Image (tube, helix red, strand yellow):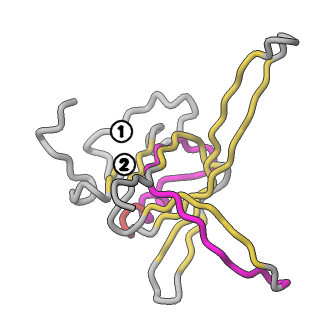
Amino acid sequence: MSGSVNKVTLIGNLGKDPEVRTAQDGSKFVNLSVATSESWKDKMTGERKDRTEWHRVVIFNDRLSEVAERYLKKGSKIYVEGQLQTRKWTDNNGQERYSTEVILSKFRGELTMLDGRSGGSDGSAMVGPSDDFAALSSSSGKSAGGFDDDVPF
């Protein structure tokens, strides 16, 4: 089908430290567990309600993997943009299983640290051009830490 879009955007916090793994071909990839939360007031009871959704994110881009490995830790607030992908696999008991993940492929995807290297929980730390690997978009074609002068902000 032409004209379709598969794009996922998440802003959330890491539930655990990034898991760095190595594929059979020797390339590195990183698994992230990202939590997004919402809260509301129940109209019937007036009680405060919360819901957290967990998302599996897999980074196959070498530079983004390096950012995740070097700077991210449990609790880090991040912006992630990638594609939704479901894969089928067989567990140790021979049962077929399915996993749906947000994929940041080698040539597409974006990862931005929203609370800087220090991992501040209030999200107020700004990431600037002097921070190596602080914000990197694999689709931009820029080198790590490189920023385009004609960005409008």
Q: Residue at x 76, y 78 (%)?
A: 96
Asked if residue 153 is positioned above or below residue 15 in the image, the reply reads above
Task: Say left or right for 13 vs 138.
Answer: right
Q: Residue at x 47, y 60 (%)?
A: 70
Kind of residue at badge 2:
Ala
Q: Which residue lies under the disc numbered 1? A: 127
Task: Say left or right for 28 vs 17.
Answer: left
Q: Which residues are magenta?
A: 65-93
**Residue 57: quadrant of the picture:** bottom right
The furthest residue to the front: 1
Q: Position of residue 14 (x, y in %)?
A: 61, 48
Q: Position of residue 85 (x, y in %)?
A: 54, 63
Kind of residue at badge 1:
Val
Counting labels gives 2
Q: Label 1 to label 2, Cα distance in Å?
A: 6 Å
Q: Position of residue 42 (x, y in %)?
A: 80, 16
Residue sitting nearer the eye, 101 or 16: 101
Q: Which residue lies under the disc numbered 2? A: 134
Dot 2 falls on a residue whose secondary structure is: loop
Label disc, if present, on residue 46 of the rendered structure: none
Q: Position of residue 113 (x, y in %)?
A: 44, 44
